[in-house]
Image (tube, rainbow, N blue to C red):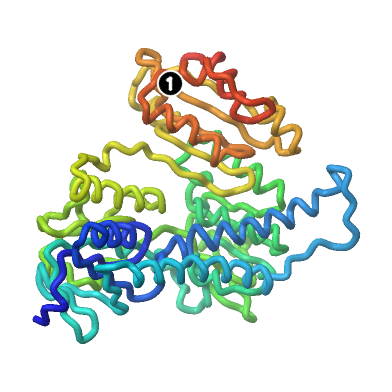
Amino acid sequence: MNRDNQFDVIVIGAGQAGPSLAVKFANIGKKVAIIERKLFGGTCVNTGCIPSKTLIASAEVAHIARRAQDFGILINGDIKADMKKVKVRKDDIVNKISSGLESWLKDTKNCTVFKGHAQFEDPYTIRVGDELLKGEKIFINVGARASVPPIEGLKKINYFTNSTIMDVDFIPEHLIIIGGSYIGLEFAQMYRRFGSNVTIIEKASRLIPREDADVSDTVKEILLAEGIDIRLNAECIELDKHDEKVIVKLDCKDSAKNITGSHLLLAIGRVANTQDLGLDKAGVEKDERDFIKVDDQLQTNVAHIWALGECNGKGAFTHTSYNDYEIVAANLIDNHSRRVSDRILTYALFLDPPLGRAGLTEAQVRSSGTKALLGKRPMTKVKRAVIKGETQGFMKIIVDAETKQILGAAVLGVGGDEIIQSILDVMYAKAPYTVIQNAVHIHPTVTELIPTMLEELKPL
């Protein structure tokens, strides 16, 4: 083994957790190698959060322009999306972030960047092309990819995933989306606002079934109001092709329920990128879904190997991946104990208006048997929402009747993805809800109505 290829730390993957961890170790004098086989920044930067939310921003501008007359603003002519320019804007933002991340790593002292596919040769040795790297500590940050399940007829169809649709620079005539959860819904609203006809197909009885029914129903109303076709309870999905059109069969016994469109997007889950790492040679265990098994501090069953980010099955979000970095860095470098179980589940659905979520759902609290109180307020009673002409949605919060601590909250409405943070911070502080109830917030804002909502708590 070449001494130059012996490292204190090897990081596999330059997604959200890997680069920061590599630089953190390098800055304390450790010799670090980081390996990336494709795109620096991983899913979030290249095919996930950053590009999709950039596209959503363009779609929102088109939507606002079409509503301008409601605010007394006159715009002459049709509002149209130039998808080539939309894509150029998106690509410029993505490339700047990705290239900046690569330069940051390459310019970091004690850090060596390797490009290529990494595979374990043994528990301490990683092969990258013709080179063998040996590491005392190894961190796996390889992420996940879109799931492509074995749907009957899929081989006949040219379809998109959330990754490949990022290359589109035209407006599909009729985009059919299989999957009525977070990714599918964001693309549905986005492309409808760009000018496509859109149909969402979901096997479950409602959209985003992990959410409470009132959230699912309101999201459905929002999308229907924009002219999106929604088909629930799809009993038997099969695909076919005719005259370059995509045919989706919703009921294999009734052709009248077929949907015909120009393009198809699969948005039905994620699969960990762990099958081709040679984990068996390292003795690293995976679960039945190919996610790497880790403990509460993200250590695998092999003492010197950790797994961070989406590949460990502990969180499917950029913020949980970055928190994985923080947990590992705290435990191994900063002498500060942090655990996965310390974090509170939180995320957003970036529709317009957005959904911000934190903690438990109402259904989860009910099933737990916890004595709880519920507060709820429609956005029609929020002056900021009325001023902006965005009165769809509601806020709700659930608190423990005995401890007065907040158990969960949902803000589906204007600013929901930001407003939820103020509730989340109080949850982390383990403070009673009265801290918010007694606070004085700025008027006119959405957040100022949270204390009002808390004054109207009722038994769940």
Which residue is found at the position 54% from the left and 39% from the top?
418
Residue 236 locus on image (x, y percent): 48, 59
Q: Is residue 306 above or below residue 222?
A: below
Image-quadrant location for residue 335: top left
Q: Quadrant of the N terminus?
A: bottom left
Q: Is residue 397 above or below residue 206?
A: above
Residue 397 locus on image (x, y percent): 49, 26
Q: Position of 240 compared to 292: left or right?
A: right
Helix, strand or loop at mark 1: strand
Q: Nearer the viewer, residue 75 or 331?
A: 331
Q: Is residue 10 visible?
A: yes
Which residue is found at the position 57% from the left and 54% from the top?
186
Which residue is disc 1 drawn over? 399
Q: Nearer the viewer, residue 392 or 217?
A: 392
Q: Is residue 242 above or below residue 395?
A: below
Q: Position of 421 compared to 296: left or right?
A: right
Q: Nearer the viewer, residue 213 or 282?
A: 282
Q: Amino acid at mark 1?
A: Val
Q: Is residue 288 visible?
A: no
Q: Position of 311 compared to 415: left or right?
A: left
Residue 105 locus on image (x, y percent): 35, 68
Which residue is found at the position 59% from the left and 24% from the top?
441
Which residue is found at the position 70% from the left and 58% from the top?
193
